[in-house]
Structure formats: structure tokens, C-alpha cells
Image: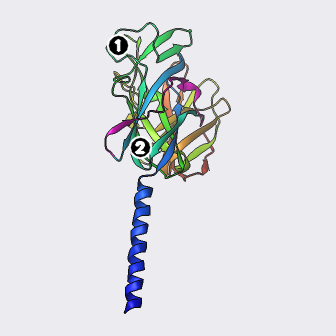
Amino acid sequence: MKRIQTAAYFFVLASLLFACQQDDAASGTGKLALSVTDSPIDASNVKAVYVTFTGLEYQNSGGNWTTATEFTKAQLVNLLDLQNGKTSLLGEFNLNAGNYTGLRFKLDAPSRGANTPSNPGCYVELISGEKKPLFVPSGSQSGYKANGNFTVPINFTVAVTADFDLRKSVVLTGSGSTYILNPTLKIIVNNQAGEIKGTISNLLSTNKYIIYVYEKDKYTASESSEPTGENVSFPNAITSTKLESNGSYQFSFLAAGSYDLIIVSETSAGITKVEKTIAGVIVESKKSTLVNSSL
């Protein structure tokens, strides 16, 4: 009987120690390595899109927003430099371990409807060299939100990339002189992402070509219609890129899944045409999917 009692005592003691270790682990910390990337913009007269990041907030499991106190220095980034898998590291931040459901970027940007600033922190640079303020709704107050989930592991670093899709984000409004940055960011955990790359041949040298990526079976013919107001064409594409002069292309930071590629040509007169659909392209985490085709 004593042996049974002794064994039971040690079992209970071991269980309590394990529970304490679990509690300690739950209150541990890890790091978030945060980068930004981009997709190209439609406007051919835009040379650069500069955004000044002044702060960061994060949301733990759908709860309250917390300020990242380590983000102490403003950073000016030309988002159009960050295409075809290129990124810019905003910093590494210590966070409590656990699941996170969103990020908010604080930007040095005027709100829409405000007076035009003489030296804006966010602006569009045109091919002509002219600089236009980039207005951001609530960018400096409540923040510019990026959607997506990521988990910070205890004593380790999770690398995450926020993808700005400038094709859908930057909108020219009013009389054609006001640029607005609308929120269309998504968060990608780097080691869970895959990529698609390849070459499209038999292109006309006089045309420009763009590939749009859709989740499988989400594209409809109406998406290619001429947009009105502040809308964009191909609105439900999750990303896009221009074909290089040799027909090569690359899509990085894609979640694992099945995608359709929509290849679109544009003449010098601005006439667009859907040239081809490549359906059911499979992307796997941490792998590159090669897709070559011909028009």
C-alpha cells in the first residue's frame, strides 16, 4: 500500500511541475521579424511610391491593439523597389509568445480631405519628377491595417512579410491629381509561403503584359471590364506582376493552395485583352512551382 501511495505522490508532483512549466512557457516571449514587399502599380507615369513608417501595433488573438515600443525611428521606403520577391526589413520586435491576428502600421501621411502638405511623408513620384502627396485614410491616427495570422514561438523568431499591392492600393481620384492609399495589405508567414515563376513566350514587343493571380475558380470575365470611379480592373486578384522583356515573371509569398493565372496584354493605346488562363497551378509551402507557357 505504501508503495502505491508513494508512486501516486510522485505522479501528482510530476504533474504539478509539468503544469508549472507549461504556465511559464505560455508567458514566454519570442521575436517578430517584419518585412514589407509590393506588387507593381498600373499607372505608367508613376516612378516611385514612398511611404514613411512611424510606428507599429499588433493584435494578440483578436484582442486589444498593443504598440511596439521598439519601433522608435521613422523609416522611408520606396515600395516600388520591392517587387519580384524583394523585401525591406522594418525591424525585429519582442512579442509575447502566441497567436496574432493583425498588424497596424502608423504612417507619416495626411488624411484624406486634409490640406495638401508641403513636405509629405508619403508621396508619389512621377516620371516627370513631380511629387504628389499620398493621402492615407487614418494612416497616422488609427493606422493602416494588414490582415492575416501568425504565431510567435517561445525563444524563436517568426519571419513575416506584409504585402502591399499598390495596383489596388494607390487610387487616383477627383480631377486626376489626388492619390489615395487604400488598405489592401495581407500578412504572409515566410516559411509557410511558396512561389510561382516561369517564362511566357511568343509575346509582341509592342505590347505590355501583366499576369494576375487568382484563387482557383475565383476569376470571372467581368473582372476585366473597364473600372469606374475609384475601382480597379481585376479587383479580386490577390497579386499581379508585369512580364519582363524576356517574358519571365515571379510571384513570391503565396500561401499554399491552388491558383489560376490570367495573362493580359495591353497595347500602346491602352486596349487590354485577356490572352490566356492557366488553371489549377499548385503552390506548396517553401517550394517553387515552375510554369512556362506560350501565347
Q: Circle 2 is placed at which residue position?
A: 148
Camera-side mark, 1 or 2 = 2
Q: Rounded to the nearest whole Å, what is the CA distance between mark 1 and mark 2?
A: 32 Å
In magenta segment, residue 77:
yes
Amino acid type at image mark 1: Gly
Location of the C terminus (image quadrant): top right
Residue 219 visible in the displayed image: no
Percent coordinates x, y for residue 277 in the rendering: 51, 42
Location of the N terminus (image quadrant): bottom left
Q: Is residue 33 left or right of residue 182?
A: right
Q: Residue at x 44, y 62 (%)?
A: 21
From what the image shows, is residue 150 above or below residue 175? below
Q: Circle 1 is placed at which residue position?
A: 174
Q: Residue at x 49, y 16 (%)?
A: 124
Q: Secondary structure of the magenta portion, mostly?
A: loop
Residue 146 is tagged as none
Which residue reaches farthest bottom? 1
Q: Residue at x 34, y 17 (%)?
A: 112
Crowding at label 2, few (<14), some or many (≥20) Cα neighbours within 10 Å?
Answer: some
The image quarter containing residue 243 is: top right
Amino acid type at image mark 2: Gly
Q: Residue at x 33, y 28 (%)?
A: 142
Q: Nearer the viewer, residue 38 or 87?
A: 87
Q: In the rendered structure, which segment of residues is drawn in magenta?
A: 62-86
Percent coordinates x, y for residue 165 in the rendering: 47, 32
* Disc 1 secondary structure class: loop
In magenta segment, residue 7:
no
Q: How many marks?
A: 2
Which residue reaches farthest right? 246
Percent coordinates x, y for residue 227 in the rendering: 38, 25
The image quarter containing residue 248 is: top right
Q: Give the mark nearest the N terminus, 1 or 2.
A: 2
